[in-house]
Image (spheres, helix red, strand yellow):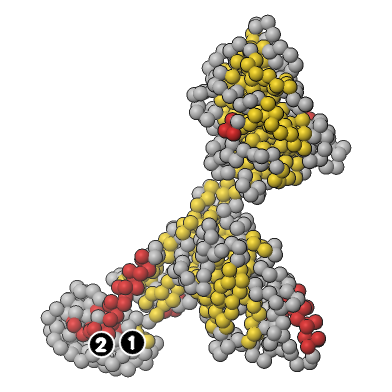
């Protein structure tokens, strides 16, 4: 946390040393509940209320310049015995340290990314810190940016906060927060705070294991038929059935729809053939695939056997769709050919310096050929069918071959080598190296979400301390390469019996991963911890009025909700009994003034809470008795605990009694203009004649005299009714369910 230099009695050099210690200590500050209640207005300025009634205001909190801008931060009502820091910090939620903060440790006091405010007369007052003004006020300016000093507000929720300085790290009363959002972001307070994992955390879990396709080698989820095609070899230890071939599975259940076990061999006769690599889908249904050693076949669900051709030359090492619907690209070692699928005739052939596998990018007319042995990658122009560039693979020759895949959205080339994934842009420039603990074996892309999925396989040699027999699934953003989901362990998935492969359902909701050593396909489903999509806002109501707080969240599985209330400034919380719906409605009571409320959403992945909001309850004024027409017959007012209560209305009068603090008691109006009773306990007495126009609108009421403290005169001018109407309209317009006056009173939410 930054400190600002100054002088103090006892010598400037001693103070400088103390200030440096203070600045370092500030980095280790313990957090306190940041239970600030953020105002409903998403515009600027934004205000939050602290646990002791502090008011914190920031001049702007949305649409901020990611590169940095100045914001004005003002406070009032802070204690004059404790110093505070003002800064932009990672918002870790209630009862958690707001850290790290922008600015780090400033030993010179020249930084403007944070401010230190101290009580008047504090030894650090001066160059290092400024003193509170009267009433615990301050008015400072800080410079904030989206990223810096270990803080990245594009990745985590951030807030402008106040918190006790390093000398009172255990003081939990000074923390107030205002969530901020930079340009292109949603406001930080919308997503809530994750309790065990951050809100909106994506992860995957195993939902099923399919063992109906022998030893699975390759996968393709057909974009049209939605069937799962599996290229498989035989798994000799499982049964006496030779399971090699092309399997077609129902992706929901793993049951077999079809099994194409035979394909034409070198003589044209059908024979049992494994499906080594799947090139791509056929329109409607079916796939093109390679079967050992030099077969190129095609088949769809329901076929008894594959149709295919047998090529001359070396073994096929890779295969992909050609530049026309009737052709296919084939690698036979360092020879690249485009052949006609029906005849096997090569229409174009190119011999490269070396290599065994490739990835085609038809959108950009390019093909990337990798030569792991030589540590090279070559770009082939598919129009001219010539090499248009060569690039080094970092790490040099001899790297263990993993995969070569292109991102169809960006044209980037992802190359798995040993325990790394090298990412090259469409021009061949290395832009990122992703390092894993296992061997990089396959990658797939979901263009809908902009994510890349990588399966890593353990080496399987337990004599090597780096091996543990467990693989890993990782997910990255394809633009920033940031981790987009929690890493998932794949127990037992090792490379001793073949390389793993994967397929991703569009949208990334389901992922299929093969484990050749175990003879299974694992179906993984996406989970998302609750993410708040609609958060409650601070609310002000009058005694006896009905209020409603609403919160909504999304997640997978769908989260449940429960409402919680704090009566001690967000220090402790308890569940509101029976409050398990998105809306919490209750009748406001003055005893609830300052109560804080939040919604807690839960699913199997985690728990997320909305930011705490504050309910402010004010005593009703006499003018509020003049709102509605057509109440019950008039009754007598009563009083208790020094608060007068109005009497009931006449047949054509306003609503029955609302409390006024220490005020006189107004009688209800009736059709003949009866008089009201007087308050007897603490309220000054007064009498109001039965004029509906003065206190509530009796249609045939006579004239009377307005009481001195019941608000009748405001009602007569229409000021109270108008202000309530406009306030309600404004809050509803802001998307908040506000309050309405209740004819039938219900108990408040605690």
- The furthest residue to the right: 463
Q: Is residue 567 left or right of residue 122?
A: left
Residue 39 screen position, x and y as percent: 47, 71
**Residue 261, visible in the rendered structure:** no
Label 1 SS: strand
Circle 2 residue: 713
Residue 408 screen position, x and y as percent: 59, 36
Judge by depth and name the residue closer to the eye, 486 or 556: 486
- Mark 2 touches mark 1? (CB < 8 Å): no
Q: Is residue 353 left or right of residue 556?
A: right
Label whose residue precedes the other's in the sequence (2 or 1): 1
For residue 20, the mark is: none
Residue under the point 54% across and 47% down = 556
Label 2 SS: helix
- Which image quadrant is residue 523 in? top right
Residue 448 screen position, x and y as percent: 53, 41
Q: Residues within 10 Å of mark 2 (few under 14, many from 20)?
A: many
Judge by depth and name the residue closer to the eye, 572 or 78: 78
For residue 644, the mark is: 1
Q: Residues within 10 Å of mark 1 (few under 14, many from 20)?
A: many
Q: Is residue 411 above or below residue 705?
A: above
Q: Is residue 288 left or right of residue 417?
A: left
**The N terminus sits in image quarter:** bottom right
Q: Is residue 115 above or below residue 564?
A: below
Judge by depth and name the residue closer to the eye, 349 or 384: 384
Q: Is residue 479 left or right of residue 416?
A: left
Q: Is residue 7 above or below residue 247?
A: below
- Which image quadrant is residue 153 in? bottom right
- Give the Cα separation between the discs numbered 2 and 1: 17 Å
Residue under the point 71% across and 33% down = 389
Residue 400 screen position, x and y as percent: 80, 34
């Amino acid at each position: 946390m930054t400190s600002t230099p100054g002088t103090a009695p006892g010598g400037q050099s001693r103070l400088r040393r103390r200030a440096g210690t203070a600045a370092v200590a500030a980095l280790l500050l313990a957090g306190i509940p940041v239970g600030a209640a953020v105002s409903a207005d998403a515009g600027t300025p934004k205000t939050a209320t602290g646990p002791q009634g502090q008011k914190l205001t920031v001049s702007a909190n949305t649409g901020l310049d990611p590169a940095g801008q100045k914001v004005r931060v003002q406070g009032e009502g802070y204690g004059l015995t404790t110093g505070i820091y003002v800064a932009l910090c990672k918002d870790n939620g209630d009862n958690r340290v707001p850290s790290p903060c922008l600015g780090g440790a400033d030993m010179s006091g020249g930084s403007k990314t944070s401010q230190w405010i101290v009580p008047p007369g504090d030894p650090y007052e001066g160059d290092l810190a400024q003193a509170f003004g009267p009433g615990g006020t301050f008015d400072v300016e800080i410079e904030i940016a989206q990223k810096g000093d270990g803080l990245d507000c594009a990745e985590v929720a951030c807030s402008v906060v106040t918190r006790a300085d390093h000398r009172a790290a255990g003081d939990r009363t000074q923390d107030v927060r205002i969530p901020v959002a930079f340009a292109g972001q949603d406001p930080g307070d919308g997503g809530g705070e994750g309790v065990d994992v951050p809100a909106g955390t994506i992860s995957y879990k195993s939902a099923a294991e399919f063992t109906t396709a022998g030893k699975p080698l390759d996968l393709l989820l057909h974009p049209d038929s939605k069937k799962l095609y599996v290229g498989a070899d035989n798994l000799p230890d499982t049964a006496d059935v030779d399971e090699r071939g092309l399997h077609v599975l129902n992706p929901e259940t793993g049951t077999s729809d079809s099994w194409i076990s035979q394909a034409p061999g070198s003589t044209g006769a059908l024979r049992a053939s494994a499906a080594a690599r799947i090139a791509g889908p056929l329109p409607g249904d079916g796939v093109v695939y390679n079967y050992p050693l030099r077969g190129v076949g095609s088949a769809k669900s329901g076929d008894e056997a594959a149709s295919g051709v047998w090529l001359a030359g070396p073994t096929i090492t890779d295969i992909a769709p050609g530049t026309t619907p009737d052709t296919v690209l084939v690698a036979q070692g360092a020879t690249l050919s485009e052949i006609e699928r029906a005849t096997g005739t090569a229409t174009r052939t190119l011999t490269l310096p070396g290599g065994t596998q490739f990835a085609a990018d038809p959108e950009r007319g390019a093909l990337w050929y990798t030569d792991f042995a030589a540590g090279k990658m070559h770009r082939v122009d598919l129009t001219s069918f010539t090499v248009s560039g060569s690039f080094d693979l970092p790490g040099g020759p001899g790297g263990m071959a993993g995969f070569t895949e292109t991102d169809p959205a960006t044209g980037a080339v992802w190359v798995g080598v040993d325990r790394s994934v090298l990412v090259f842009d469409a021009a061949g420039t290395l832009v990122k190296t992703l390092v894993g603990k296992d061997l990089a074996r396959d990658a797939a892309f979901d263009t809908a979400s902009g994510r890349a999925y990588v399966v890593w396989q353990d080496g399987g040699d337990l004599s090597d301390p780096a091996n543990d027999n467990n693989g890993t699934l990782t997910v990255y953003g394809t633009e920033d390469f940031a981790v987009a989901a929690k890493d998932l362990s794949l127990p037992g998935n090792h490379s001793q019996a073949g390389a793993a492969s994967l397929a991703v359902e569009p949208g990334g909701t389901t992922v299929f991963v093969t484990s050749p050593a175990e003879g299974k396909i694992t179906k993984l489903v996406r989970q998302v911890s609750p993410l708040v999509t609609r958060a409650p806002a601070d609310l002000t109501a009058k005694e006896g009025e009905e209020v409603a707080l609403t919160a909504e969240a999304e997640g997978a599985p769908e989260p449940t909700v429960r409402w919680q209330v704090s009566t001690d400034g967000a220090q402790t919380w308890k569940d509101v009994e029976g409050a398990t719906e998105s809306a919490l409605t209750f009748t406001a009571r003055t005893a609830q003034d300052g109560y804080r409320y939040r919604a807690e959403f839960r699913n199997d992945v985690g728990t997320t809470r909305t930011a705490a909001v504050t309910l402010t309850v004010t005593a009703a004024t006499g003018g509020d008795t003049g709102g509605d027409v057509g109440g019950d017959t008039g009754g007598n007012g009563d009083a208790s605990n020094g608060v007068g209560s109005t009497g009931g209305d006449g047949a054509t009068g306003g609503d029955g009694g609302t409390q006024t603090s220490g005020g006189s008691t107004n009688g209800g109006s009736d059709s003949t203009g009866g008089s009201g009773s007087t308050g007897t306990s603490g309220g000054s007495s007064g009498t109001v004649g039965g004029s509906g126009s003065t206190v509530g609108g009796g249609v045939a009421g006579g004239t009377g005299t307005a009481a001195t403290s019941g608000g009748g005169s405001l009602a007569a001018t229409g000021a109270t009714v108008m202000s309530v109407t406009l306030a309600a309209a404004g809050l509803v317009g802001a998307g908040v369910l506000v309050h309405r006056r209740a004819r039938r009173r219900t108990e408040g939410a605690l």
